[in-house]
């Protein structure tokens, strides 16, 4: 998978999403199950954010990335306006004290690639934050 270094805009996006995660984390709700915030930066620089939504029925739960994309779409943006996406997990346990960038799950990779195969996605690679194309996160996708 080919990756690229982060830009200053990418770093700003991560910081904004991490702040949202910190502000919205509720350790009492579902034992702190909301642990991820996501954001998408659009072509005009606007950022739309979302948080993961736990539910008592696991299949009804939502990841942060589709919530962020849905927020952008609901505000009138199109799939061709999406530029960069990131998901940030809230620190859990004594070993984690800082929020961490997490890769999208398989379903989110499919959704992001559907909306824009060239979407820039911030992912951890060998302990560093890098950017990959959404489609490159699905190397064996054949449709």
Image (spheres, helix red, strand yellow):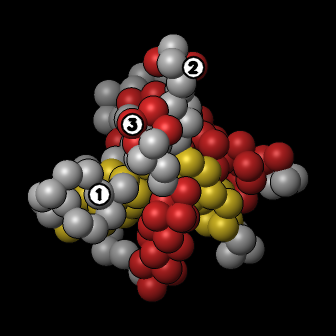
For the residues bearing labels 2 and 3, Cβ distance under 8 angstroms:
no
Which is nearer the N-term, disc 1 or disc 3?
A: 3
Residue 93: x and y in percent read 20, 52
For the residues labelled 2 and 3, the Cα–Cα distance comes to 17 Å
Q: Nearer the viewer, mark 1 or mark 2?
A: 1
Q: Residue furthest bottom?
A: 8
Label 2 belongs to which residue? 60
Which label was assigned to residue 31?
Answer: 3
Q: Quadrant of residue 123?
A: bottom left
Dot 3 lies on which element?
helix
Task: Say which residue appears at 55% left-offset and 57% top-offset.
Answer: 24
Q: Is residue 135 visible?
A: no
Residue at the extreme front of the image, as rendered: 28
Q: Is residue 58 left or right of residue 6?
A: right
61 above or below 135? Answer: above
Write down the residue under mark 1. Answer: 91
Mark 2: which secondary structure?
helix
- Across and down, in percent, residue 25 comes to 48, 54
Q: Residues within 10 Å of mark 2 (few under 14, many from 20)?
A: few
């Amino acid at each position: 998978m080919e990756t690229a270094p982060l830009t200053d805009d990418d770093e700003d996006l991560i910081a904004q999403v991490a702040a949202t995660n910190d502000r919205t984390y509720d350790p009492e709700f579902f034992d702190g199950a909301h642990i991820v915030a996501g954001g998408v930066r659009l072509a005009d620089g606007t950022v739309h954010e979302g948080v993961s939504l736990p539910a008592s029925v696991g299949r009804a739960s939502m990841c942060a990335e589709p919530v962020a994309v849905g927020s952008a779409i609901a505000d009138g943006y199109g799939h061709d306006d999406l530029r960069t996406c990131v998901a940030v997990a809230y620190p859990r346990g004594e070993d984690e004290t800082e929020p961490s960038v997490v890769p999208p799950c398989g379903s989110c990779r499919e959704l992001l690639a559907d909306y824009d195969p060239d979407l820039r996605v911030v992912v951890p690679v060998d302990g560093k934050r890098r950017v990959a194309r959404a489609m490159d996160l699905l190397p064996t996708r054949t449709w």
